[in-house]
Image: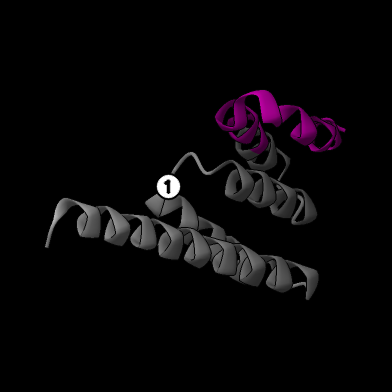
Amino acid sequence: MNRKQRRAEQRQQGKSATGGVDRLLQQAADQRTAGRLRDAVTIYKEILSADPDHPIALHQFGVTAIMAGQGDLALDQIERAITAAGDDGASFRPDLAYALA
């Protein structure tokens, strides 16, 4: 396999991994919407075990914790999401305020 082929394969693997995370995020959101919060948390933890700083998984885990009445966990996850997202973290701040309420 030459360098060009290896790079193409690496790009494809990266796309597959991203697609897998996107699928898991959608599954978790579906579980949360259906009120199956424990199932959603399990999926978020799966994503975070592979990528502990995944901002969307951290944020949605925090939102799920709010729904479950776990304010301290929600604060921790949403704060981590804001840090992990960098400049894009501002969009998570309203949920941080909600978790503080």
Kindly identify the residue that appears in the image at 78 percent across and 34 percent down. 91
Packing grade of label 1 (10 A; few <14, some 14-19, many >=20) is few
Magenta span contains residue 91 = yes
Task: Write the start and end of the magenta stretch as one range.
Answer: 78-101
Q: Is residue 77 above or below residue 40?
A: above
Which quarter of the picture shows residue 81? Answer: top right
Kindly identify the residue that appears in the image at 42 percent across and 61 percent down. 17
Query: Which amino acid lies under the numbered mark 1 shown in the image of this protein?
Result: Asp
Q: Main secondary structure of the magenta part?
A: helix
Check the image and name the residue furthest to the left: 1
Residues 31 and 54: in front is 54
Q: State the residue position of label 1.
A: 51
**Does the rendering let one see residue 36?**
no
Which quarter of the picture shows residue 62? Answer: top right
Kindly identify the residue that appears in the image at 68 percent across and 51 percent down. 60
Q: Is residue 20 above or below residue 34?
A: above
Kindly identify the residue that appears in the image at 58 percent across and 62 percent down. 22
- 31 vs 83, left or right, is right
**Does the rendering let one see residue 37?**
yes
Question: In the image, residue 84 lies at what x, y percent?
Answer: 55, 31
- 72 vs 15, left or right, is right
Residues 37 and 91: in front is 91
Q: Is residue 28 above or below residue 96?
A: below
